[in-house]
């Protein structure tokens, strides 16, 4: 078989592997792809018969590296046909049977199509150097995708590397050989309370692994995702890890619409164990567990509330720290509720610029209206009084209309009796 010599091939693979922190198999794959690209360009430059090379034309070609003889070969998979239309893709049955008598029409065979060293060697070396770096980057991206794809939604430790406009480039730990991998923390995923400086360390949630050959880091991380809070509670609260306490729902506003309002999270928890307080388990002794999460999130307010299957109870709990007097479910189908609170609890229930009720609505999935209970009762009494007044007026009108009718009936009865008496007298006088 033909061989294009590449002196020092084994040493080159070793050096590239160490320099780029890539496994040797990944370097070999990149080298094969680069050499195949070089062969493709060589063929295009030698295309004297103006043959049309479409995009998938060279898909049946591959490169075989030979580290023992330090070189490579070009192999082509061809289909056996009766009439050959394209010598790169087809081969005649007669030609194949000279070397493989058992071959049949429709079979595929792999053939060595390596060009002569003098024709292809120099060209291959030039083209390979131009393409190899890109192929190595592609291999790095491929390995990153394979490693981090299953880690989406988990928490990673990050370190600030540099700043690109409003975005932050951070490094996260890797296990595939490269000690750290770059990730991007976009402006919209940052926390307003964070103090980002070079080499600062903090926890992030791996939100997405971007695929493809786009520019920039492949990993998209977040400090504002609700999943970050959930994961940190899972770490701090053993009962969650042991499935004794479960997180039912979470709503988070890491970047409030106003700079006068700070980040806040509401988390609903529950348990099937009678002797376990799920809220207390999350808060910990003297608030130690929840404080660890708050510290990591730079002082973000966190409300841990008890989940309930009863919507009214759940809504009342969700409006914590406000005390709720009553919850009226206005429309269960449309999930619309009215919450009544005392005057001194009204602003607390609504929250600064509506943040508390907004988060409670997201947590429960109900549209929540809040009203002062004193005003609500006064309005209800007023409506009741107006209704009673209207009813009394209606009754009086009915009585007024009935009076003439009664008089008319009485007069009619009187006349009938008079007539009857006259008739009796008339009859008596007649008989006598």
Image (cartoon, helix red, strand yellow):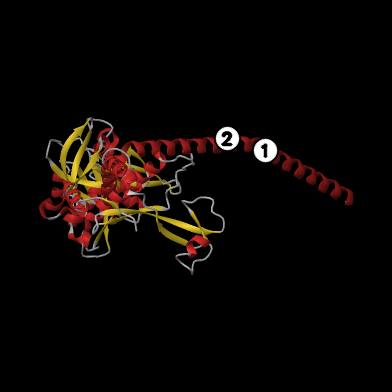
- Observer-side mark, 2 or 1, equals 2
Spot occupied by residue 123 in the image (x, y as percentages of width and height):
31, 42
Which residue is drawn at the image coordinates 25% and 48% (left, top)?
140
User: Hey, which quadrant is residue 285 in on the image?
Assistant: bottom left
Q: Nearer the viewer, residue 424 or 373?
A: 373
Spot occupied by residue 290 in the image (x, y as percentages of width and height):
16, 50
Q: Nearer the viewer, residue 284 or 80?
A: 80
Vertical order, 197 against 312 (above or below): above
Secondary structure under badge 2?
A: helix
Which residue is drawn at the image coordinates 52% and 66% (left, top)?
104
Relative placement, left or right, of 20 versus 330 is: left
Q: Nearer the viewer, residue 154 or 323?
A: 154
Spot occupied by residue 187 in the image (x, y as percentages of width and height):
25, 34
Vertical order, 391 against 318 (above or below): above
In this rendering, does residue 215 appear at all?
yes
Image mark for residue 397: 2
Secondary structure under badge 1?
A: helix
Q: Earlier along the polypeptide chain: callout 2 or callout 1?
A: 2
User: Hey, which quadrant is residue 234 in on the image?
Assistant: bottom left
Near mark 1 (Cα within 10 A), the count class, few <14, some 14-19 or many ≥20, is few
Which residue is drawn at the image coordinates 34% and 58% (left, top)?
1
Mark 2 vs mark 1, CA separation in Å? 14 Å
In this rendering, does residue 211 appear at all?
no
> Which residue position is annotated with label 1?
405
Spot occupied by residue 281 in the image (x, y as percentages of width and height):
18, 57
């Amino acid at each position: 078989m033909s061989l294009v010599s590449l002196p020092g091939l084994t040493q080159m693979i070793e050096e590239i592997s160490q320099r780029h922190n890539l496994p040797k198999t990944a370097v070999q794959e990149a080298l094969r792809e680069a050499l195949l690209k070089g062969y493709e360009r060589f063929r295009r430059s030698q295309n004297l018969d103006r043959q049309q090379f479409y995009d998938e034309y060279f898909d049946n070609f591959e490169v075989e590296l030979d580290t023992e003889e330090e070189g490579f070969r070009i192999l082509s998979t061809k289909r056996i046909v009766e009439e050959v239309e394209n010598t790169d893709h087809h081969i005649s049955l007669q030609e194949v049977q000279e070397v493989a008598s058992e071959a049949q029409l429709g079979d595929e065979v792999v053939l060595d199509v390596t060009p002569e060293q003098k024709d292809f060697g120099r060209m291959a070396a030039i083209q390979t150097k131009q393409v190899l770096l890109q192929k190595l980057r592609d291999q790095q991206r491929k390995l990153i995708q394979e490693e981090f794809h299953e880690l989406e939604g988990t928490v990673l430790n990050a370190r600030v590397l540099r700043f690109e406009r409003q975005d932050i480039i951070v490094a996260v730990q890797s296990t595939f050989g490269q000690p750290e991998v770059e990730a991007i923390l976009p402006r919209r995923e940052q926390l307003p309370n964070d103090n980002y400086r070079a080499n600062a360390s903090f926890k992030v949630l791996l939100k997405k692994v971007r695929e493809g050959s786009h520019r920039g880091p492949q990993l998209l991380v977040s400090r504002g995702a609700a999943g970050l809070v959930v994961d940190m509670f899972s770490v701090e609260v053993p009962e969650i890890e042991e499935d004794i306490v479960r997180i039912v729902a979470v709503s988070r506003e890491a970047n409030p619409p106003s700079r006068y309002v700070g980040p806040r999270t509401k988390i609903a928890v529950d348990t099937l164990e009678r002797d376990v307080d799920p809220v207390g388990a999350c808060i910990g002794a003297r608030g130690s567990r929840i404080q660890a999460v708050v510290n990591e999130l730079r002082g973000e307010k966190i409300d841990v509330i008890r989940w309930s299957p009863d919507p009214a109870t759940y809504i009342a709990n969700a409006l914590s720290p406000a005390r709720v007097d009553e919850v009226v479910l206005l429309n269960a189908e449309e999930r619309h509720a009215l919450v009544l609170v005392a005057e001194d609890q009204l602003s607390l229930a609504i929250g600064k610029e509506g943040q508390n009720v907004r988060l409670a609505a997201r947590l429960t999935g109900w549209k929540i209206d809040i009203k002062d209970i004193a005003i609500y009762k006064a309005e209800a009494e007023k409506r009741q009084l107006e209704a009673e007044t209207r009813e009394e007026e209606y009754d009086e009108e009915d009585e007024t209309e009935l009076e003439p009718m009664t008089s008319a009936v009485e007069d009619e009865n009187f006349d009938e009796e008079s007539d009857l008496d006259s008739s009796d007298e008339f009859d008596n006088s007649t008989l006598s």
